[in-house]
Amino acid sequence: MLHEGDYCHFLQQVAPGNNTLPVTHGCQFNLTRPADVFGTDGSNYSVSEVIGEAKLGVRGPADARVMISCRLSPRAQFWFWVSADGHWNIDSVVDVHNPQELVAAQDEEPLRQYVSIGGNLNRVQFKCAAERGSRDVSLALNMNGHQFVSFLAPMPAASTPLTRPATPWFVDVAARLTSPGTLEGTAAAVLLYESE
């Protein structure tokens, strides 16, 4: 095992109406105002591939989301998320205000039947990998024992060279509320593994 993080240790009070509380190796979110809230344990991993597990659950407006974020700073960021109404996806996040969904609607929709809603936790497995010299990032997502997706995505800022054989990844837990309402979310039991 690579890491068990304490993701909310430094993120108790974000802003009035947007709070996080520590849970075992993760965060419990309570957002009452539209916001993006990220909890990181501050660690980075000098490996080119991170495989992780987490439990994600959310209750609130249909667009309320909880997620795992993989960052290859400053070049790339990807969000693995589930929403309160059972949607899911992987976003490429060059601009946090306009994340781009990488899984087409016709591929995302049939798998919603396996997503737990109503605040129930989903067991999520994810992979982020970027080898030195590659112009692609390998991404994969499994949920509740089902393989959802596995593919290569173009590396944002591909002209920026990787300077080490394994550029450090950062892994965060997060919640996003974009409409009025109350988001109650959990990203817990976050475990990271390395395959190198």
Image (cartoon, grey):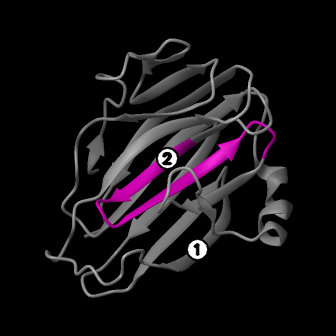
Instruction: Label 2, secondary structure: give it.
Output: strand
Measured from the top left, where is residue 185 in percent x and y? Answer: 61, 27
Determine the residue positioned at 59% across, 56% down.
Answer: 98
Q: Return the mark for residue 68.
A: 2
Horizontally, residue 4 falls left or right of residue 53, namely: left
Measured from the top left, where is residue 101 in percent x and y? Answer: 65, 63
* Vertical order, 41 against 140 (above or below): above
Q: Is residue 77 magenta?
A: yes
* Vertical order, 127 against 157 (above or below): above
Determine the residue positioned at 45% across, 50% down.
Answer: 69
Of 178 and 27, the residue lying toward us? 178
Measured from the top left, where is residue 136 in percent x and y? Answer: 42, 82
Q: Amino acid at mark 1?
A: Ser
Residue count near mark 2 (Cα–Cα under 10 Å), binned few <14, some 14–19, many ≥20: many
Measured from the top left, where is residue 113 in percent x and y? Answer: 85, 52
- Where is residue 162, by image quadrant? bottom left
Q: Return the mark for residue 150.
A: 1
The answer to whether the residues at label 2 and label 1 have Cβ atoms under 8 Å apart is no
Of 189 and 33, the residue lying toward us? 33
Q: Is residue 83 magenta?
A: yes
Q: Amino acid at mark 2?
A: Ile
**Marked residue nearer the N-terminal end (2 or 1):** 2
* Vertical order, 127 against 145 (above or below): below
- Where is residue 100, by image quadrant? bottom right
User: Residues in magenta?
Assistant: 67-86
Residue count near mark 1 (Cα–Cα under 10 Å), binned few <14, some 14–19, many ≥20: some
Determine the residue positioned at 56% across, 50% down.
Answer: 97
Give the CA distance from mark 2 to mark 1. 16 Å
Instruction: Label 1, secondary structure: give it.
Output: strand
From the image, state whether disc 2 or disc 1 is nearer to you. 2
